[in-house]
Image (cartoon, helix red, strand yellow):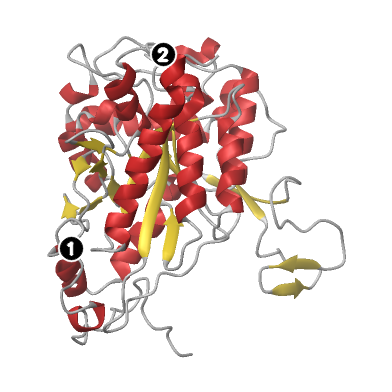
């Protein structure tokens, strides 16, 4: 769902279970929780705890998330690949549901950056008060009841399958006229607060009171974002750091290991080879399109296949450069769009199918990548960051990472389990 496309408070514990939430126990006598059967009368471990108006709920730990492990001395790091989607929502193209299936078929999880106004109906548009703009203004419009229902369904299923739900904020304002590049730290805090509120109150705003909730607490789920048009990163990162976010992916970087800015992991998209050109290209479908057909989203049909192959081959060349070299995570950004005949969607699917099933490759969400980075010895990360684009250690990985790392502090991902 494109950035430019218009598409039509406290926790409350309940002894209820929405049938569409995975793993819920129904019936009497005994219930089955994550650790096995429980006696009647006991609340099952996976009971739904509704939050606020029931738009969201706590349903236990997110399923299908592997535990982040610290690298052993001399161990070669895995090759991470992150596929992510700006303004994620389900419309008539049904690309959200399609790529959920692509993920499952190829042992991958992804990050879906939800635009908050995709859960706000047109008749409630004045609920949105964008910074530096009048109430009810949005450069990507709002949604209708069917669109909200379809999007919520995909968000629910995506999270249950181990994918991450981030944010692409709300009105998608770019450029000099009140665009996000001119926003203050306080403006960003307001925008983030509203993005959360629209997710946490979609039932109230739509009147769909009987619908199943989103199965997560969005205040805890939301740990990262990508800004509209990659603008406003500096002040956003300051706001995000103060609000407890863990990463940002709004910048442009080379294919090197990430570091931290403002106490956030800088998981920016990267420059990869652009077949047929002497310069490199950002790992995002929109940027490939602009450098192929300009501002025309449906350019010369005779070139559609060629343009898609260019993107696919550029991403694969970038992948191979890292896989055989420094093993830096490959960060890729996309939109649910059919630009140039859908050629970029086809390219992304071919990349997923090509790379995610290779040995030592992990196609993960940003949250999972941040978990893994947090689990590592900082000295190990510093060593990895010393490798340049495509540079493998001269003496091999066993020698390069052979020094004994410091033990993981208690409580961080990758730390040894505490003995009872």
Q: CA distance from mark 2 to mark 1?
A: 38 Å
35 relative position to 351: left or right: right
359 relative position to 17: left or right: left
Residue 300 position (above or below residue 152): above
Q: Nearer the viewer, residue 365 or 36?
A: 365
Circle number at residue 391: 1
How packed mark 2 is, by other alpha carbons closer than 10 Å (few <14, some 14-19, many 20 or more), is: few
- Which residue is denoted by mark 2 in the rendering? 300
Q: Nearer the viewer, residue 410 or 341?
A: 341
User: Which is in the foreground here, disc 2 or disc 1?
Assistant: 2
Kindly identify the residue that appears in the image at 22 percent across and 78 percent down: 396
Marks 2 and 1, the one that precedes in the sequence = 2
Q: Position of residue 386 (x, y in %)?
A: 12, 65
How packed mark 1 is, by other alpha carbons closer than 10 Å (few <14, some 14-19, many 20 or more), is: some
316 relative position to 34: left or right: left
Circle number at residue 175: none
Residue found at the very far bottom of the displayed protein: 420
Kindly identify the residue that appears in the image at 73 percent across and 56 percent down: 24
Q: Position of residue 17 (x, y in %)?
A: 73, 50
Residue 31 position (above or below residue 213): below
Secondary structure under the numbered disc 2 in the rendered image: loop
Q: Position of residue 305 (x, y in %)?
A: 46, 27
Residue 345 position (above or below residue 304): below
Q: Position of residue 268 (x, y in %)?
A: 25, 44
Residue 76 quadrant: bottom left
């Amino acid at each position: 769902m494109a950035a430019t496309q218009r598409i039509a408070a406290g926790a409350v514990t309940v002894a209820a279970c929405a049938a569409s939430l995975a793993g819920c126990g129904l019936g009497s006598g005994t219930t089955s929780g994550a650790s096995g059967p429980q006696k009647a009368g006991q609340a099952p471990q996976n009971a739904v705890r509704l939050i606020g108006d029931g738009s969201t709920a706590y349903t236990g730990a997110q399923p299908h998330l592997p535990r982040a492990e610290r690298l052993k001395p001399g161990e070669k790091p895995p090759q991470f690949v992150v596929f992510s989607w700006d303004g994620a929502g389900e419309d008539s193209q049904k690309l959200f549901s399609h790529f959920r299936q692509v993920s499952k078929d190829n042992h991958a999880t992804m990050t879906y950056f939800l635009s908050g106004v995709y859960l706000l109906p047109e008749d409630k548009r004045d609920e949105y008060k964008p910074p530096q703009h009048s109430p009810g203004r949005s450069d990507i419009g709002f949604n209708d009841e069917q669109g909200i229902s379809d999007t919520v369904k995909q968000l629910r299923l995506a999270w249950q399958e181990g994918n991450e739900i981030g944010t692409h904020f709300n009105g998608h304002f770019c450029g000099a006229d009140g665009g996000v590049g001119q926003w203050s730290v306080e403006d960003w805090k307001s925008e983030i607060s509203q993005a959360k509120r629209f997710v946490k109150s979609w039932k109230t705003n739509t009147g769909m009171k009987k619908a199943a909730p989103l199965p997560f607490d969005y205040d805890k789920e939301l740990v990262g974002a990508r800004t509209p048009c990659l603008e406003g990163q500096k002040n956003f990162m300051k706001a995000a750091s103060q609000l407890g976010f863990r990463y940002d992916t709004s910048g442009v970087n080379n294919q090197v290991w990430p570091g931290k800015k403002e106490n956030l992991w800088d998981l920016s998209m990267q420059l990869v080879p652009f077949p047929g050109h002497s310069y490199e290209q950002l790992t995002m479908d929109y940027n490939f399109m602009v450098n192929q057909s300009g501002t025309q989203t449906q350019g010369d049909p005779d070139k559609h296949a060629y343009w898609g192959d260019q993107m696919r081959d550029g991403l694969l060349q970038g992948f191979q450069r890292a896989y055989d070299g420094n093993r830096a995570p490959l960060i890729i950004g996309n939109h649910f769009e059919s630009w140039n005949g859908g050629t970029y969607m086809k390219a992304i699917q071919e990349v997923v199918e090509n790379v995610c099933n290779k040995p030592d490759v992990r196609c993960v969400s940003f949250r999972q990548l941040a978990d893994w980075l947090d689990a590592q010895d900082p000295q190990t990360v510093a060593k990895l960051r010393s490798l340049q684009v495509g540079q493998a250690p001269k003496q091999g990985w066993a020698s390069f990472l052979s020094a004994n790392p410091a033990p993981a502090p208690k409580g961080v991902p990758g730390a040894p389990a505490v003995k009872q």
